Image (spheres, grey):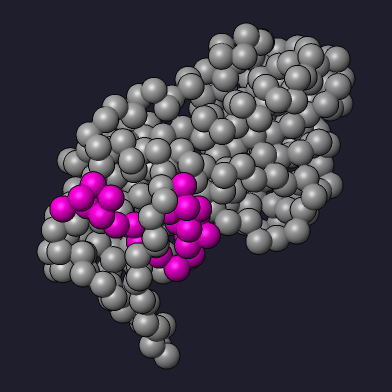
Amino acid sequence: MSEQNSFMVFSGTKTRYLAEKICESLGCPLGNLVVTKFSDGEFAVSFEESIRGRDVFLVQSTFPNSDNLMELLLMIDAAKRASAKHIIAVIPYFGWARQDRKDKPRVSIGAKLVADLLSVAGIDRLITMDLHADQIQGFFNVPVDHLYGSGVILPYLQSLNLDDLVIASPDVGGSKRANSYAKYLGCPLVLCNKTRARANVVASMQIIGDVKDKNVVIIDDMVDTAGTITKAADIMKKAGAKSVRACASHCVMSGPASERVAESSLEEIVFTDSIPYTQQCEKVKQLSVAEMFAETIRRVENHESISSQYLL
């Protein structure tokens, strides 16, 4: 079997936009997969071409709603039953990742449950990007290729040529990520200390560091309701920041997020296209990670190292 047709790429329903760009970069066609929906909401998955003996890459982010995860599980099961040689799940956005530990009694660890579901379904490898917590990789007993959105975000930040640049983390938990950006760009780091009233609701926030007359870039892994990031931007602007931008890998942007961003002090907010953004907000910009995933797929298929893809 020739190298060109030794692997095939398929996509779930909601991540087709990204899979098409990945296939364009790889120079291969997107595989033919059909999802049949029933009137009660149930659905079935079928591969419309032979995948016997092939390495099958299944592209699907597991963002809400849960149908995306269930669709991926059915794709994996169908591939296993169709005698695929290896099944590689390509999950640009790994959902449920915020539930990575027991932070109070009697709660689920959703990230471990999803890892178990994928493993039992039959994946041989996982390719993902910017997990909420790096240690989630340890929930899997198969190889995990963990990519970073910094591969596309850092070149964009450098292209802005901002003077008096400061990198900021919206909370203490994200300080390691923000510190990596600050070291790479050779600029100071500022932290925000926040307390939450409840999930998705910030009670108070204080800035640790100097932002006066600085161009601030807030770094995070995802933006959900945008409450934290817009509050941080407004506080920094009041503290004398020249400008405030935000960069995050995953554009969850649920509920009132777009309105909050539009009304905030943010100049712009930059995401990757791991999740599609369908709402309207002039401040939102998306950078494609299709080439990064395509190159990773090519290297995995050719048994080459992927470490040279990491900028940080």
Q: Nearer the viewer, residue 41 or 194?
A: 41
Q: Residue 40's spot in the image, x, y percent?
A: 40, 88
Q: Residue 162's spot in the image, x, y percent?
A: 77, 19
Magenta span contains residue 285: no
**Residue at 23% from the left image edge and 47% from the top image edge:** 3
Query: In this rendering, does residue 19 appear at all?
Result: yes
Q: Quadrant of residue 159?
A: top right
**Residue at 77% from the left image edge and 53% from the top image edge:** 281
**Residue at 16% from the left image edge and 53% from the top image edge:** 1
**Residue at 78% from the left image edge and 29% from the top image edge:** 244
In the depicted structure, whether residue 260 falls above or below residue 37: above
Q: Residue 200's spot in the image, x, y percent?
A: 60, 47
In the depicted structure, whether residue 277 falls above or below residue 201: below
Q: Residue furthest bottom?
A: 39
Q: Relative to residue 97, is residue 243 drawn left or right?
A: right
Q: Nearer the viewer, residue 217 or 21?
A: 21
Magenta span contains residue 18: yes
Q: Quadrant of residue 184?
A: top right
Q: Nearer the viewer, residue 26 or 149?
A: 26
Q: Which residues are magenta?
A: 1-25
Q: Quadrant of residue 280?
A: bottom right
Q: Relative to residue 200, is residue 230 drawn left or right?
A: right
Q: Relative to residue 30, is residue 199 drawn left or right?
A: right
In the depicted structure, whether residue 124 falls above or below residue 158: below
Q: Residue 64's spot in the image, x, y percent?
A: 49, 61
Count of all numbered marks drawn on residues in the image: 0
Query: In this rendering, does residue 197 appear at all?
Result: no
